[in-house]
Amino acid sequence: MSESVKVYASPNVVTPSKPVVINPDVCIGCNTCVRVCMNDIFIPNPEKGKPPIIIFPDECWACGACVMECPMSQEGVEKSAIEVNWPLMRRMRWKRKETGEHFRVGMPNPPAPNLKPPCR
């Protein structure tokens, strides 16, 4: 292919939601997430230093590889550059009947385990 040929990419707009949320104020445009994504949902942004483009959102497995490898999402960094927007079916929550408290997986300061035996 010659250098004079332009290649265009347009995002797949099938999915109304975003599988990952990229904070453009924190993202440094290193494209690490583009390299580690198993399903190739990202493409590098043509503008150097800008966040990658999510081109195939409905292909995301919400595995979190992009978040784990992002240098701006590592421990010690104030704000995260990329976060997984978990699908509704994978947002596990539960409620204690006695107190009415709601809990979710991965919450800060999780509750003590329930040591009460299950009802028979």
Image (cartoon, grey):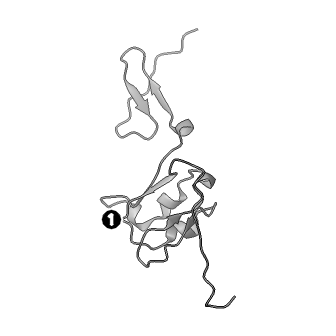
* 39 left or right of 74 in image: right
Farthest residue to the left: give it: 78
Q: Judge the density around disc 1: few (<14), some (14-19), many (≥20) Cα neighbours within 10 Å.
A: few
Residue 105 in view in this figure: yes
Pinpoint residue 94: horizontal percent, then vertical percent.
47, 26
At x 46%, y 16%, the residue is 116
Which picture quadrant has residue 29? bottom left
Pinpoint residue 18: horizontal percent, then vertical percent.
50, 51
* 73 left or right of 53 in image: left
At x 30%, y 59%, the residue is 78
The three-letter amino acid code for the residue at tag 1 is Asp
At x 57%, y 70%, the residue is 35
Q: Which residue is mark 1?
A: 25
Pinpoint residue 106: horizontal percent, then vertical percent.
44, 41
Disc 1 secondary structure class: loop
Pinpoint residue 54: horizontal percent, then vertical percent.
53, 61
